[in-house]
Image: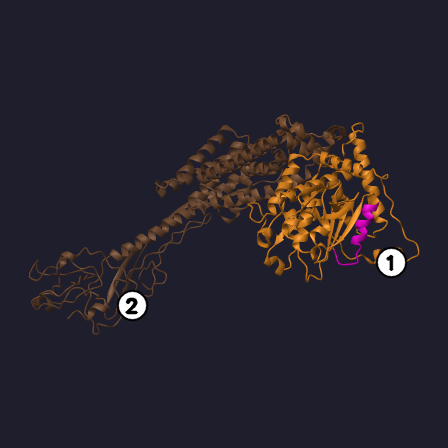
Chain colours: A brown, B orange
Amino acid sequence: MRAAIGLTLPIVATVLFALWLDIIAALTWENFGYILTDDRELKLGNVLIGICAAQLIILGILALTAYRRADDFLTTAEVLDRHVGAHQEILTLATLANPANPKSRERRSALFPMLWRRAIAYLDLFEPRREFRLEPLQPLKRSAIAASVIVVILGLTAFAFVIVPTPEQAIAHHLRAVARAIDSSSATPATRDLAKAMRDVARDLENPRLPQEQKLQELAAMKRDIEQNQQQRQRGASQGKNSAGGGSGAGSGSGNSKGSGNGAGNGAGAGAGSGEAAGSGAGQGSGTGSGSGAGGANKGSKNDQKMAQLGNDISKAQAQIQAENGQQNQANGQQLANNGSGMAPKDGDNPNATGPQNKPNGAGSVSLPKPGSEARNNLPAPSNGAPSGRRDDKGSMGDTHLGEIPKAGNYERFYKPGEGPALGIRDARYVTFRLPSAPVGNEGAGRAVADAEHPAASVGYTNAPLKQERLADTPDEEQLVPPRYRDLIH
Amino acid sequence: MGAAPQQISPNERVTEFRRTFARAEAEVARVIVGHRDAIRKVLTALFCGGHILIEGVPGLGKTLMVKATAETLGLSFKRIQFTPDLMPSDIVGTQVLAESEGRREFSFKAGPIFAHIVLGDEINRATPKTQSAVLEAMEERQVTVFGTTYQLDAPFFVLATQNPIELEGTYPLPEAQMDRFLFKVVMGAPKPDELREILARTTGASSYKVQSIFDAGSAPDKIESEKALVREVMVGEPVERFIINIIGACTPSGPDAIPEVSQYLRFGPSPRGAQSLIMCAKVNALLEGRVTVSYEDVEDAIIPSLRHRLLRNFQAEAENVSAESILEQAVKRLKRPR
């Protein structure tokens, strides 16, 4: 019984922890932005079941041990002896009268009758209910300590399972929570359908293979469904119950916006250049508004509040997802800018001079519309005349590739000396160099430089100089050559 | 001799034992001020059939206590002052040439060992040869002189005293002889109140004469009867296991030795130690009116029964770790069997 009492509170604590997991989550980790996803919640549930099972097994072992102890002849005599204060007289009588040990009778002396009478006298005084009175206080204290330890362990275990959610996971979690709330309340078939739809959307949101656009569309559809459902409920409630006047109103607004921008920047310097960049951004905004009229019994139920909150959260999630898309678009814009074409470089007076703070590689930035606000057409703003996707863009400092060396896709421009068509480099923004790892015979053309820092070419290449007749021609565009390579070019 | 009267019920026998013991204890206590525990242990050893070693500085009343005990019980009493020149024949007796009816022949002249209660005063001052003469008498309750064995009358009870100071010229008792004493009782200095009472009794005009609690000549039989009763006290198996555990815990080479025992002892108690433990516990049980031994009875008997059976090593002597403290640690560490 003491074992049962001792394990009662830990088991109750475990069961309550499992039952109140949603409440505990709302009060603790969800306040700090963490959530327990469905699969992790399932794992945590398994852990809780395991702990509960372990507690039951321990309880069973303790009960079995207690039963075995109580079933032992001498142990029982010892317990009785202790309870009645017989100073081992009952115990000695038990050892001398143990049915399992017939030889014990030989140890009896002439004083055994006296022992028998004294033991019987003790047993006459023995009142089991009085001697073995259940005193639950001490076991309960131990049980409370054990329960506290269990709660701490469960809490730490739960914290081990929570994660920082992505916007999709957060809104999916919220959708499931509202769906559960709808299911647990006396919902109409329409709301049950809505709950089912919420679960479907939540599942799709957590599916990484679905494109973001589809997720956004599903979210928008879900938002509309929620708003319609709210409107229907409020309409029905105001018609049916609001006899005292007043009313309720709900309004929603949504807007979509898309923005795109192009920016161009020019820079002039010793190596004058121009850049063109394109960036595009898309934004979508929506706003909802709801109000309740005063009077009557028109009070929003908990589910209505949750639905309204869910609508807001969906809007936020949409904005966040779009923000992620915008960032991706920015990255794309930057990539486009890098791949854009520019003016060919011209020779300057001072080849070592750095150019102005031009940002030919800039990308448009997108400012996102906020929910509820009027949609704006946000264009990417070019910086210093040249669009740049990098906030800390301080210019190229004369280095045209800005640390981003293009893929070596133009190797066909380089041939072994005497090979290939006549060089006619036009509209070239970059010239890529691949320096041989060892000097090769170049027949007096150019200068071979060993490059030990970069992967060695399998075939000895050297930069093929332009033909003399073409060197005299003025190129249409000048190519910006990285300063560190300028000494190599004669 | 010594057979328990069958017509008396066990309950009456126990009651009689308690009454006898209480009367003897009270009578000795009328002469000896304080030292109640020592008096009880002396009487316990007597009813257990063992011998006792009393240790204390001179002037504490050791000899007086033994004499008072003998007079209280109405037993014959002899005192032997052990000195270095004491010979074994001075103790056990010898053959002397005697003339009887015109014939001369050797006859046995019994020594002072032939008494119910023998006080060996300052036993550690005699040579080992003389000390060993007492061994046979203590253990076998017989002496052998010139090939002839003489039985000692029962009850035979040796009380030896030992002075812990002035150890020059002494012969410490060998372990084998120490083991033959059931108890070792240490008498301490009297408390101020006790000392005041001692002064009042011994320096006044009146003196108290100890009275025997038994009728003349009946004492040996009655004491033997009580000794038989003590042996009939029963011991349960768990209590026996407890005693065995104590002995095991105090045996340094044993697997159950506690750390203090392994650290500070050279040798632990012999099986005689367990026997004395049980016998003392049985007397304790009877004094409580029980016929079975309890754990408390055993715990009360541990120190007087085992303290002189533990042989300390050099480290224990250097660190002044007493045998009593080791025994107390053993009792603390041991759990009673469940």
Find residue A427 and report its image quarter: bottom left
Confirm whether the magenta stretch covers residue A329: no
Q: Residues within 10 Å of mark 1 (few under 14, many from 20)?
A: few
User: Where is residue A293 shown, x and y percent of the image?
Assistant: 58, 40
Locate the N terminus of chain B by quadrant. Answer: top right
Q: Which residues are magenta?
A: B56-71
User: Where is residue A27 shown, x and y percent of the image?
Assistant: 56, 45
Find residue B142 and report its image quarter: top right
Which callout, 1 or 2, points to the residue nearer the camera?
1
Q: Is residue B5 above or below residue B151?
A: above
Q: What residue is shown with label 1?
A: B199
Under circle 2, the secondary element is loop
Q: What residue is shown with label 2?
A: A397
Q: Amino acid at mark 1?
A: Leu
User: Where is residue A10 shown, x and y percent of the image?
Assistant: 58, 38
User: Is residue A59 toward the left or the right of residue B147 in the image?
Assistant: left
Residue at the extreme right of the image, as rendered: B205
- Residue positioned 44% across, 34% down in the render: A197
Residue at the extreme front of the image, as rendered: B102
Q: Is residue A239 visible?
A: yes
Q: Residues within 10 Å of mark 2 (few under 14, many from 20)?
A: some
Give the Cα separation between the discs numbered 1 and 2.
Answer: 116 Å
Q: Is residue B222 above or below residue A355?
A: above
For the stretch drawn in magenta, the main secondary structure is: helix
Q: Amino acid at mark 2?
A: Met
Q: Are marks 1 and 2 on the same chain?
A: no
